[in-house]
Image: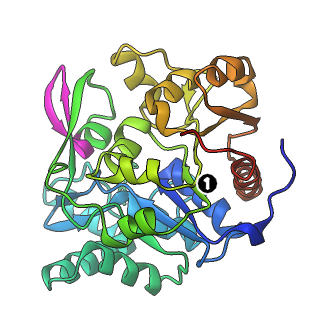
Amino acid sequence: MPERYNPERYNKVLAFSGGVGGAKLALGLSHLLTPEQLTIVVNTADDFEHLGLSISPDIDTLIYTLAGLNDQQQGWGLANESWQVMAALEQRGSETWFRLGDRDIATHLERSQRLASGQTLAEVTAALADQLGVKHPILPMSDDPVRTRLLTAEGELAFQQYFVREQCQPVIDRFYFSGLDQARPQADFLRLLQSEPLDAIIICPSNPFLSVEPIISLQGVRQAMRDNPAPVVAISPIVAGLAIKGPAAKMMQELSMPATALAVAEYYGDLLDGFVIDESDRALLEPIKALGIDVAVCPTVMKNLQDRIDLAASVLSFSQTISRNS
Ligand code: FO1
């Protein structure tokens, strides 16, 4: 790996994240960079309205993780949660496939009430993060609704129906993001991309299709990423042909792509200046370099906090060595 990064060289790093996997790296980055140096932009295409509540799973995973309150085993939700509301709903025969813990429900009530009173999702997110003591800015990718829809062998499904209710079992034919064409990137996000010379844009090891694609497909984002002098560095969510979490590897097979880190690099294509792969995928170093992308090889599986900080340090060191593709 390159020399240790110099934290003082950073004015601003932007990290793109989905839920659990992305939040792990974002936590590592938050240990190395100050709230002034790091802003995290989060996918909101997994959001949905359920039991009358506005739920933003990836934003909440980020907030709970950075606050040190997340359930480490599940990756989502709060640690030491109680489930009285779910038990009461079950007794009534109501819908319980999406598990909402009692204290987590307080988050959704706050969000729903604030959105109903006219606050933007970004304002609500900042308030929720502040309530839990999170200092690093967390921005929703958009204040406008974007919703992932999957066309599967069992019909069209909303994201959480596919992911949680159907446990990612249905075979995917195609997916799209409803509302994407009308949605504007969140204003601070676009301003950072367009008017700040960023030091790095880091694409966390989140699902490239379902978590990262909605962010980079928002109007003007791809172009602004290209125009910004910052190197764009992604971390492979596929390690040795398997997704660390979630359906990425299964999806790749269903979409007729090999489930490899190389295929992820090809999917991101010329958007990337650098790609970080796991040591177990060292054999892919040259084929990925042949795409014109710089490659770093290091341990990418994050089992504990030190792994998260170590990977964040490796990614930052690597990004300081990269010369921009034009
Ligand atoms: N994931 C599950 O697998 N099962 C659940 O019941 C579930 C509930 C849930 C409640 C609140 C929340 O913020 C997230 C929740 N998640 C659950 C996780 C979430 O749906 C997914 O991890 C993300 O959307 C994918 O990034």
Q: Where does the image place residue 95, in percent across and percent down from the top left?
A: 17, 53
Q: Position of residue 5 (x, y in %)?
A: 80, 58
Q: Nearer the viewer, residue 103 or 37?
A: 37
Q: Position of residue 116 (x, y in %)?
A: 13, 80
- What's drawn in magenta, residue-wise? 150-161
- Which residue is rendered at x = 48% and y = 15% of the image? 258
To which quarter of the image does residue 120 belong? bottom left
Q: Is residue 307 left or right of residue 238?
A: right
The reply to whether residue 159 is visible in this rendering is yes
Magenta region includes residue 159: yes
The residue drawn where x is 41% and y is 59% is: 42
Q: Position of residue 263 (x, y in %)?
A: 50, 22
Q: Please say which color scheme the image uses.
A: rainbow
Q: In the visual, does 99 lie left or right of 75?
A: left
Look at 44% across and 62% down and name the residue there.
193
Give the residue number, with chain letter if any, for mark 1.
25
Q: Secondary structure at mark 1?
A: helix
- Circle 1 packing at 10 Å, graded few (<14), some (14-19), many (20+), is many
The correct choice, above or below, for 30 with respect to 226 in the image is: below
Is 311 colored magenta in this rendering?
A: no
Q: Residue 81 vs residue 201: left or right? A: left
Asked if residue 74 shows in the view, the reply is no
Nearest the camera: 318 or 77? 318
- Position of residue 273 relative to residue 24, above or below, is above
Image mark count? 1
- For residue 309, which quarter of the picture? bottom right
Report the front residue among 320 and 179: 320
Cβ(mark 1) to ligand 1 < 8 Å?
A: no
Q: Is residue 1 above or below residue 60?
A: above
The amino acid beneath tag 1 is Leu
Q: Residue at x 48, y 33 (%)?
A: 270
